[in-house]
Amino acid sequence: MSDKFDGWGFEHRDLFLSAGPCSAESEEQLLSVARALEGHGVGFLRAGIWKPRTRPGAFEGVGLRGLAWLDRVRSETGMKVGTEVAEPAHVEACLEFGMDVLWVGARTTTNPFSVQSIADVLKGVDIPVFVKNPMSEDIGLWVGALERLSNAGLKRLGAIHRGASSPLEMRYRNAPAWRMPVEFMRLMPYVPILCDPSHISGKAEFVPLIAQESMDLLFDGLMVEVHPDPLHALSDAAQQLTPVGFIQMVEGLRKPKEQGGGVEYAQRMSVLRNTVDEVDAQLLELLEKRMGVVREMALAKEKENISTLQPHRWQEVLLDRISRGESLGLSGNFVLGLMQLVHEEAIRQQEAERCC
């Protein structure tokens, strides 16, 4: 397990694991999962007690009685247990039942008022708390949520990456958006970060693939949805693994290291990194050239009193660039994000040129 978890009170393993059903459905269900996972290095059993659903009428969790079920799981198996909290009442109930771990969900992270209300209740409490990234790729909200909890005196804080919503059609439920956790690691290198491959993939068949990608990016662990009978799960049935499937996945994961390799590897990497540096320099020069053309366009628009933003032209450009990128083997999501950044800078440059 990463040394970032030192002092957290979890059994020391080379990889931090949290596993359990999306939702607690019955006492028997939780005990079945816990007994199947017992002895396989799971740091704590996860289970949703309160489930925020997009629209009313769906299964919204069993509520307080689920905490009693988790308490029994802990007493009978010795496993630590945890659940998601979204409001002060949830936190107070979890503290009353002595939950071992809490996490803040993506929808809650989006709202600083909600996070602050949770932080206020947790002030002076020593309990591990994880924070999932928001639904959007807003890393400021993610970091800000952890800062609010830290300001409340919480020391054992961790992050969970669960992907981000995307306007593009893709094979996953959420875009992996690896840019976010990579930047998070740079901004908060002392905070352990788990990957939630279940919510990223949306389908059980893709969970191992996403889990391995997170290992290749040096995540500290995983939070995975595991159900004894996924086909009949009351929520997120498609993305949950069976206990056997989870154990097989974990046993098959490669856990690469950041440094190492022989002399031949070091020489090869030196050549490749120099090539990357050269290509990056060319990219920057091309971007500057593009902005030069954009500034000329600004002057032409100014002369004819034409708006800076050209929505129809921008839509044409975006569709064309995404198509071209995909033909070159680049993901549409990547090209979309890149072109949006380029377009934002182009707008800024045009506005600067026109106002001066």
Image (cartoon, rainbow, N blue to C red):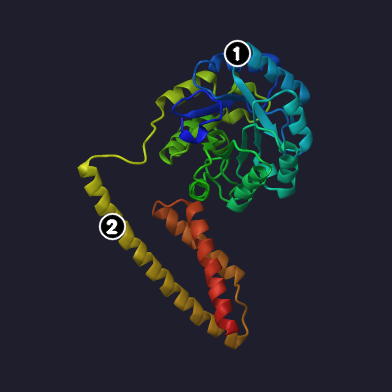
Location of residue 13 in the rendering, given as x and y in whole percent from the top left corner: 46, 25
Q: Name the residue carrying label 2.
A: 274
Residue 328's quadrant in the figure? bottom left
Q: Dot 2: what SS? A: helix
Q: Closer to the N terminus: mark 1 or mark 2?
A: 1
In this view of the protein, which residue sits in the foreground, 174 or 315? 174
Q: Is residue 228 left or right of residue 207?
A: right
Tally of marks? 2
Q: Is residue 209 visible?
A: yes
- Residue at left 38%, top 70%? 285
Q: Name the residue carrying label 1.
A: 77
Q: Gap in Å between the C-alphas at discs 1 and 2?
A: 53 Å
User: Does 226 sit above or below residue 350?
Assistant: above
Q: Quick one: label 2, few (<14), some, or many (20+) residues within 10 Å?
A: few
Q: Dot 1: what SS? A: helix
Identified by mark 2, the residue type is: Asn
Identified by mark 1, the residue type is: Thr
Location of residue 160 in the rendering, given as x and y in whole percent from the top left corner: 57, 39
Residue 175's quadrant in the figure? top right
